[in-house]
Amino acid sequence: MYLQRTIRKQVSVKGVGLHTGEPAQLNFCPAPADTGIYFVRKDLPGAPAIAARAQFVKATQLATTLGGDAFSISTVEHCLSALAAFRIDNLFIELEGPEIPICDGSAKHFVEALLEAKMVEQESARKYAYISQPIYYGTDEKHAYVTPYNGFRITCTIDFPHPKIGRQTIDLDINEHSYTRLIANARTFGFLRDVEALQAKGLARGGSLENAIVLDAHSVVNKEGLRYADEFVRHKVLDALGDLVTLGMPLMGHLVLYKAGHDVMNQLVRKIIASPESYRHIELGTDLYDYRLEDHHLWAFT
């Protein structure tokens, strides 16, 4: 069977907060089996902690923010995305401020930190949410849904009225190798026309050409250009994987996204949690043989 994972040793990632513009640092720290993923605010009295769970998501504007009664942690999706790809189940993420470092706008630095820390298997079995019936959230304009699939696959489509973006679609099975090769290096992006408005709202104060793809009306402003021709949709996959971590367990199914951002992902995750009849908990290597996908009807939304 697949066993739960944590990391062998503590590692750190430093940078600035994308929205606060303040120095930011996190420490990835090993955690016992069956702990889950927790963010810990070491800078606050009592070092309060909050689980990476959908019910604690308090904001989804431009980033995913987790919040408690007296504190919050912003821009959690990039580091959570890397944890999902490397099958990390149990981890304490220590912070000295309210935001995760943005680094270069991708998950590259978090992947490098995890590879340095090295993964270690634990004594408890890894439990999956195995989708048996489709679950849908959204509208014709933007939506997300999951359907049965023997693995984890994601199909993502975006559509922006910009000559460098337009309509882009990517479809792939997600694992450590595909994520590292195709997704982890894809950077977040934004439009030059929006910068002043965002900063007036107290957002994007740390944004720069060093940590985001910036577009003017016609082109990419960054001198080095794009890392991939479809870097934009790849980054949306990166974000979605991070947001999916708030389900509380890895998902087995096909995730389909159409123009879906953090808000749609959070609502989909909440709907999955509220639909226990549409999935069941399994342990790979023990339960899956008795629950073969071909024994069940496949559904598709059109």
Image: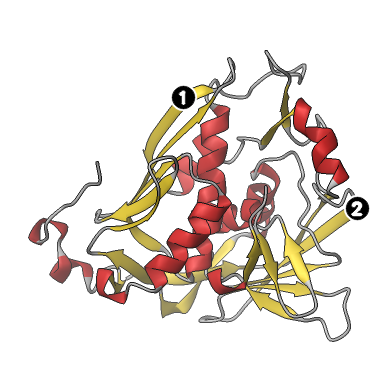
* Image vertical order of residue 58 relative to residue 148, above or below: below
Tell me what residue is drawn at x 50 percent, y 53 percent: 264
Q: Earlier in the sequence, mark 2 or mark 1?
A: 2
Kind of element beneath mark 2? loop
Viewer can see residue 249:
yes
Colouring chosen for the image of the structure: secondary structure
Disc 2: which residue = 22
Tell me what residue is drawn at x 54 percent, y 20 percent: 229
In-front residue for pair 90/187: 187
Residue type at tag 1: Arg
Residue type at tag 2: Glu
Residue 299 lies, in percent from the top left, at: 18, 51
Kind of element beneath mark 1? strand
Tell me what residue is drawn at x 41 percent, y 47 percent: 143
* Image vertical order of residue 194 relative to residue 225, above or below: below
Q: Residue 167 carries which label?
A: 1
Residue 179 lies, in percent from the top left, at: 50, 43
Label 1: few (<14), some (14–19) or many (≥20) C-alpha neighbours in 10 Å: some
Relative horizontal placement of residue 120, taking residue 216 as reference (left or right): left
